[in-house]
Amino acid sequence: MQVKHKQTSSDLKTDRDTTSCNFL
């Protein structure tokens, strides 16, 4: 599983939400 790490605050929130959905 590849997770994109972004330093942008907005992208970080989006990635965080997406990651949570994927892990569920």
Image: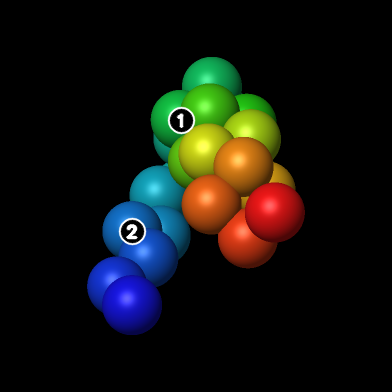
Please state which amino acid type lies under the numbered disc 2: Lys
Residue 9 coordinates in the image, percent (x, y): 58, 30
Q: Quadrant of the N terminus?
A: bottom left
In this view, the residue in front, 7 or 24, is 24
Q: Which disc is residue 11 wearing?
A: 1
Q: In the image, residue 22 lies at what x, y percent?
A: 53, 52
The local crowd at label 2, few if under 14, some if 14 to 19, many if 20 or more residues have their Cα within 10 Å, is: few
Q: Position of residue 20 (x, y in %)?
A: 67, 48
CA–CA distance in space, label 2 to label 1: 10 Å
In the image as oriented, which residue stretches furthest toward the top? 10
On the picture, is 6 further left or further right than 18? left
- Type of amino acid at the residue the image marks with label 1: Asp
Kindly identify which numbered label has been placed on residue 4.
2
Can residue 11 be seen? Answer: yes
How many marks overall? 2
What element does badge 1 sit on?
A: helix
Q: Position of residue 7 (x, y in %)?
A: 46, 47
Could you say which disc has been placed on residue 22 in the image? none
